[in-house]
């Protein structure tokens, strides 16, 4: 079963004009344009190897994406792990009523090997994804913690294979060597019903297996010792402050930069992701939304070429 907990122990940075400049400087450093490594030195952590039956915490965020979270929750219900103790932690806002109702529905499903963990944040804290990820990283008791997105699915045997791959490893960061991707799907193809449900992809939603070259945003699997020691961009105030709207996730690349690695590929077959043309987490005028949608379609065509 799962219970919704309101997160009250966050250390959120107060608003400051310095944050915008700090974020810009950090992006230049991450891209190699400014030599600022001394300002943010890589943390020296020596993880201990874990063997036997491992524990894994999966951390997801959801804001107006409940129609995609339905698939993520449904994948764990349909394919419960057998050889790894799994916690699914979802950060969300109570103002997102459909997501709240979906989580309450999922909590009524007891899944062997899975513990539901729902964490409610004010939406202004949810809009900067690294706030929730940092909270989860510092609080986790798991051997490994997987920072993902709510459009990621876990197929049959996926988490068990991952657990085998993680036996005795001391890498700070790993990622699945392959993922199964859909094409850019329309709103109609992935839309949920009026009432939330736990779903699995229909035959109309097909996936193509694609190699992964680095631990990108939804595929960052971190050793628990590393997460507890450094959090998720814990010491970067620009990435630990409330925002009035959802912010682009520059902190993902900063996290890898702080670790000094893009990660090591491991075997975890059955990781899938539903790619969707609309970004429901962003609000704005319809013309602005249309431009974003057009750009995503153009980017998708260029990648496929």
Image (cartoon, rainbow, N blue to C red):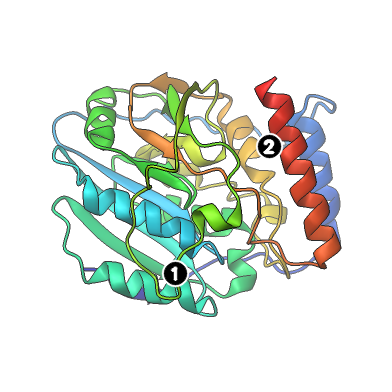
Q: Nearer the viewer, residue 66 or 259?
A: 66
Q: Earlier in the sequence, mark 2 or mark 1?
A: 2
Residue 297 visible? The answer is: yes
Question: Tag 2: Cα neighbours inside 10 Å, few (<14), some, or many (≥20)?
Answer: few
Q: How many marks?
A: 2
Above or below for 11 versus 142: below
| Residue 40: assigned label | 2
Q: Quadrant of residue 226?
A: top left
**Label 1: few (<14), some (14–19) or many (≥20) C-alpha neighbours in 10 Å:** few
Image point 32% across, 61% down: which residue? 198
Residue 133 x, y percent position in the rendering: 50, 53
Give the residue pinned by disc 1: 193
- Secondary structure beneath dot 2 equals loop
Q: List x then y, in percent, for residue 253.
A: 64, 36
- Along the line of sight, which residue is nearer the eye, 303 or 2? 303
What residue is at 52 percent from the left and 73 percent from the top? 93
Furthest-front residue in view? 204
Kindly indicate the quadrant of the structure image that contains residue 83.
top left
Q: Classify mark 1: helix, strand or loop.
A: loop
Q: Picture coordinates of residue 66 (x, y %)?
A: 47, 64
Q: Quadrant of the C terminus?
A: top right
* Residue drawn at (55%, 31%) of the image: 259
User: Eyeballing the image, is 182 above or below 7?
Assistant: above
Q: Using the image, determine if residue 46 lies above or below residue 136.
A: above
Left or right, residue 3 beside residue 180:
left
Residue 107 x/y as whole percent: 26, 69
Residue at the image point whose x is 66% and y is 55% from the top: 279
């Amino acid at each position: 079963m799962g219970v919704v907990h309101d997160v009250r122990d966050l250390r959120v940075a107060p608003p400051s004009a310095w944050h915008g400049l700090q974020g810009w400087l950090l992006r230049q450093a991450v891209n190699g344009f400014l030599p600022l490594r001394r300002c943010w030195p890589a943390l020296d952590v020596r993880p201990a190897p874990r063997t036997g039956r491992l524990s894994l915490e999966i951390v997801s965020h959801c804001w107006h994406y409940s129609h995609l979270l339905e698939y993520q929750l449904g994948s764990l219900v349909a394919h419960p792990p057998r050889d790894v103790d799994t916690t699914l932690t979802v950060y969300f806002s109570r103002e997102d009523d459909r997501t709240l109702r979906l989580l309450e529905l999922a909590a009524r499903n007891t899944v062997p090997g899975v513990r539901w963990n729902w964490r409610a944040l004010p939406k202004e804290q949810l809009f900067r994804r690294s706030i929730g990820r940092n909270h989860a990283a510092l609080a986790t008791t798991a051997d490994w913690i997987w920072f993902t997105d709510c459009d990621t699915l876990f197929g049959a045997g996926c988490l068990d294979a991952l657990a085998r791959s993680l036996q005795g490893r001391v890498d700070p960061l790993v990622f699945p060597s392959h993922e199964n991707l859909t094409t850019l799907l329309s709103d109609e193809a992935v839309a949920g019903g009026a009432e939330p449900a736990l779903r699995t992809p229909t035959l109309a939603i097909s996936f193509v297996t694609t190699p992964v070259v680095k631990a990108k945003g939804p595929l960052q699997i971190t050793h628990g010792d590393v997460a507890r020691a450094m959090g998720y961009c814990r010491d970067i105030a620009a990435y630990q402050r409330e925002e009035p709207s959802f912010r682009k996730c520059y902190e993902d690349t900063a996290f890898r930069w702080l670790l000094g690695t893009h990660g090591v590929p491991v075997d975890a077959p059955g990781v899938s992701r539903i790619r969707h043309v609309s970004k429901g987490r962003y609000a704005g005028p319809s013309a602005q939304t249309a431009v974003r949608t057009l750009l995503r379609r153009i980017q998708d065509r260029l990648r496929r070429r």
